[in-house]
Image (cartoon, coloured by chain):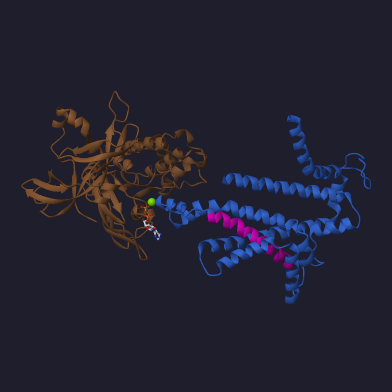
Chain colours: A brown, B blue
Amino acid sequence: MAEPVLELRGVSKRYGEAVAVDEVSLTVERGEFLTILGPSGCGKTTVLRLIAGFEQPSAGEIVLEGRSMAGVPPERRAVNTVFQSYALFPHMNVFDNVAFGLRMRGFAPTEVRRRVLDALRLVHLEDLATRMVDRLSGGQQQRVAIARAVVNEPAVLLLDEPLSALDYRLRKRMQIELKHLQRSLGITFVLVTHDQEEAFSMSDRVAVMNQGRIAQLDTPTAIYETPANLFVARFVGEINVLPGVVVGCVEHMTHVEVEGRVIPLSTPPGCWQVGNKVHVLLRPEDLRVETLRDLDEDPELRASFGRVPALLGVVEETVYKGATYDVILRLDSGTMLTATEFFNEDDETVYFRPGDRVAVTWVQGWETVLAYAP
Amino acid sequence: MKWLRRIYIAMVLGFLYIPLAVMVVYSFNASRFSMDWKGFSGEWYLQLWNNTGLLTAALNSLVVAVVSATLSTVLGTLIAFTLTRWRFPSRRVIGATLFVMMMSPDIVIAISLLVLFMLLGLPLGFGTLVLAHVTLCLPFVAIVVQGKLHGFDPVFIEAARDLGAGDFAVFRYIVVPLVTPAVLAGWLLSFTLSLDDVVISFFTTGPTFEVLPLRIYSMVRLGFKPEINALCTIMMAITSLAVIIAYRVFKEEK
Ligand SMILES: Nc1ncnc2c1ncn2[C@@H]1O[C@H](COP(=O)(O)OP(=O)(O)O)[C@@H](O)[C@H]1O
Ligand SMILES: [Mg+2]
């Protein structure tokens, strides 16, 4: 396997008593799109600043292309940053902004010109080369910031919430463009965001951060479907958390008592022992809800209703979401659940009514089981 | 409605510019004593040219303005950098003092300086005048430059370093260009403040060193001479030039 382009080995950053980054270790492969995802204040920006060289780690080591970066100043690191505020130089026009890095590295003027124009074409700004940067829209400034960084062909491009200042539609478009740019240039991207949708739609791998630590580092699918802990599970989307106790372990079948029902789970053997307290996690879109009335009247429906014994409850309210709607229901034990339902193709009305008695089930194996954590 | 608005605009412009226009027109009037129009003449400009006393005073004023503007720009810029870059106990006190000095009536500054100079036994003249004008201008420069430095986002420096700029390149290509307009504006402001100051100059210069505003003041007291119209017209031209330059500088910055 090729040598990773960037490696963080137990990197920590303390500001006095406060720990901003706590023993973060990760490797980034050449050409990879890695996203650091986490809530505000969890240390994402600090990780980028450590990689860029604006901060020195309190402990640990950063290795870029096989070379330790200890004591190497930002101007001598083969990384470039797209700043959250863009940080375009206000006294220069678009061309000079993009040319700055090349000029600092002593390229000949004709070469600077060629590369800058190439970079501007890449971000569709070739017509605005002579415009002052404060005469650009937010989206255009964003593109200049990207061009100014990629024109230097860095080993790693660092992007700190690059899209957060843009409106929703522009953000969606830039996500696609960024991903496309990254693929076609083959540059390694390390992007920081607090938006899980953004992280999932662009990245090869996502590092979810919480309080300075990496809570999970994996592909978007793995993070969404098999979160490693409650924090990740809750951060990357809505999820129902049900407390349970392991009541039986036979070969590859584990039985868990949840909400007064014994439910079979397909977890690998040896994971749990009888008496273990666990959390059973279920995404709202994985839950299947039917009214008891329909189940009584329709034996076929009842037969198809799955092997997991249903939990019983009452619909509290429904929330319209556009393409889907959420059914908020209260189980007989008092626990609240959220289930996402799609509209029928020919019927755009919400099927469930508050007060409906319902049964809830799911396809066995779609649940995630984690050790109980208070 | 339309003509009402036009009248309104005409009134505003008239209020502002009629006095100046009258002055400019009469600086070309051939009549010496009356305000009647006696035909076009450049005579007063010629007489002005031959009035060495007046010219000397004008030259003195220019020299004082250039010297004190330069000195206060250097000192004011240093103060601004110091106040924004470093945190030290008396920082707030100095910052507040600048505002107090800027707001103090000229007469207060003038008298206090006069007392100080007499206490120190300094002979009143060029030196004391420049010192006084530096005192007058310095807070303005410091505050203008400080405003710029406060708005100066350190992220620009990081961005430049990220793109490969070392310390010198950061200073040369980022800090200097971003701060220069404010420094120039400070200089121009000081230059005009010094040039048209009457009160402070009156108290802090001596009989050996006469400046233009004081000279004009004494001339008018002895009776009005049309040369003064010519002189003021020239000064207005110089001021307009300074304003145009300042405007250009600011526009560049935008
Ligand atoms: N220069 C600094 N001095 C002191 N504390 C800092 C500094 N920079 C960041 N922090 C702290 O470190 C933590 C992480 O900050 P940051 O990396 O900016 O988070 P994020 O980008 O994820 O929002 C925060 O609690 C913040 O207050
Ligand atoms: Mg941040």
Judge from the rendering whether residue B17 lies leftward or rightward of residue B81; answer left or right: right
The chief SS type of the magenta part is helix
Residue at figure coordinates x 34%, y 52% from the top left? A44
Judge from the rendering whether residue A108 lies leftward or rightward of residue A290; answer left or right: right
Determine whether A44 is above or below B207 in the image. above
B62 or A299, which is in the foreground?
A299
Snapshot quadrant of residue A322? top left
Is residue A5 visible in the rendered structure shown here? no
Judge from the rendering whether residue A293 lies leftward or rightward of residue B112; answer left or right: left
Residue A259 image position (x, y, % from top left)? 19, 47
Quadrant of image for the C terminus of chain A: bottom left
Determine whether B111 is above or below A261 in the image. below
Is residue B238 visible in the rendered structure shown here? yes
B186 or A255, which is in the foreground?
A255
Residue at figure coordinates x 14%, y 28% from the top left? A299
Residue A37 image position (x, y, % from top left)? 31, 48
Residue A33 image position (x, y, % from top left)? 29, 43
Q: Residue furthest top?
A: A346
* Segment colored magenta: B127-150
B248 or A211, which is in the foreground?
A211
Is residue B83 covered in magenta?
Answer: no
Residue A96 image position (x, y, % from top left)? 47, 43
